[in-house]
Image (tube, rainbow, N blue to C red):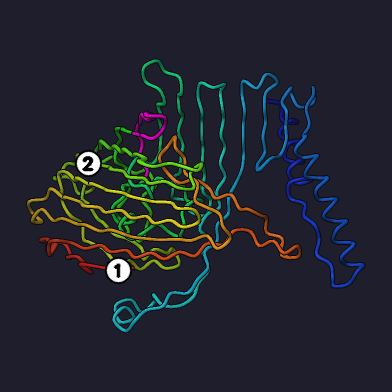
Amino acid sequence: MPLRSIVLGLALIFTFGLSSPARGEDGPEAAASSEKQASLYNQWMEKAGEGIQGIYTGGFHIYWKDGLHLDSWKKNLKFTINGRIEIDAGYIGADDELDAAFPNLAGGDVNLRTFQVAMACKIRDAADLKLTFDFANAREIKDNWIKFKKIPFVGHFTFGYMKEPISLEYMTGGKNITFMERSLPVLAFAPGRDFGFARRATALDKRLTWTVGGFWVTGSYSDVGDANDRLSESFGAAITGRISYLPRHADEGRTLLHVGLSYTHQFRDESRDDSQLKASALPESYLTDDTLVGTGKIPTGGIDLVGLEIASVFGPSSLQGEFFQSFVNSDSAGNPRFWGFYVCGSHFLTGEHRNYNRDAGVFSHVIPNQGFHPMKGQWGAWEAALRFSYVQSSASCSITSTRACRIGRSRA
């Protein structure tokens, strides 16, 4: 692709995509000016949507629609570049017991959670390619994979660095989860992203979905509070699978019942120091580095994790819950077991409902009934939600030459 095509595309972003109507002061003249600016902004966005194409773009159609798009002349190749910024802000309260154990836990803070750039490429209808970089968390590696969609007798086959298919909440994208952060047991037990391959398919008119894959376990458990999504020396392998089913799906998804089961087995070398397990979880917030649940390093030759999931949507209301049981094969540590669950409910005050992706068996993005324009009396979509999370160890976790579990149980 010629360099001038890229330059023109970036110019298109800054000219059309980043412009916004200015705010004026109160009064009729200010209101008229605001409407004029809004009209001009809409014209710019319409032109950006039309884009540019010709010899000077190398034959590519370059346009802006929720990101920068570059389509080849015959649309055999389609490139998309977009980004996402997430900022967490909040206040953490703590009772006397927590305040004594974690003096720095309570208080307010602001954190740049995500500064992510994603590039996707669609090669006809045969393959998809995705590359994702997060500059807010330089040590983390996000989705970087290629998906082949038309392999005979195989179907969708993905190869690269991706999420292991486990848990409804974990497989639901970060932009689409209900809360600021995933629940305590998901943070503690989900294996994270790893390098490997996976096969996904649907059946029974997309009421049934299943995914199975093999992975090299590379996520780091070495530092408390650190994320799993990074590459290190491989210290094991895993076989992971998930199956979900919709006993009920009506009214275009406004009413549904979802059930699912997931399982993973990790093969590890107990004699290697870097193969030791360390399970920990932040208190459902990245505003602190303190972990309410944490273990010392556990020498293990293998780990089994089972997850059960259920969710229901009935109009603007929904319920969801998952249960996890982890079995750690470690004679020196007494073969400890860990388990946990969460239950949550939500209700859209503005009448929307949670959307469901039947191709993947997960929830997708919510579509507001109206935009966010307070001056026009439009307030977007508002949702009230409540969640209870719980994790516990069924053993003392006393380990020779390592520290024991800091806290055996935790609620959030």
- Residue 311 location (% of width, % of height): 37, 51
In the rendered structure, the answer to whether residue 34 lies left or right of residue 372 reads: right
Q: What amino acid type should be assigned to the residue bearing mark 2?
A: Gln
Magenta region, residue range: 193-210
Please tell me whether mark 1 sits on a helix, a strand or a loop. Answer: strand
Q: Which mark is residue 344?
A: none
| Quarter of image, res 200 | top left
| Quarter of image, res 145 | top left
- Tell how many labels: 2
Report which residue position mark 1 lands on: 411
Residue at figure coordinates x 45%, y 78% from the top left: 107
Please tell me whether mark 2 sits on a helix, a strand or a loop. Answer: strand
Report which residue position mark 2 lands on: 266
Residue at figure coordinates x 16%, y 41% from the top left: 269
- Residue 60 location (% of width, % of height): 71, 25
Query: 168 above or below 373?
Result: above
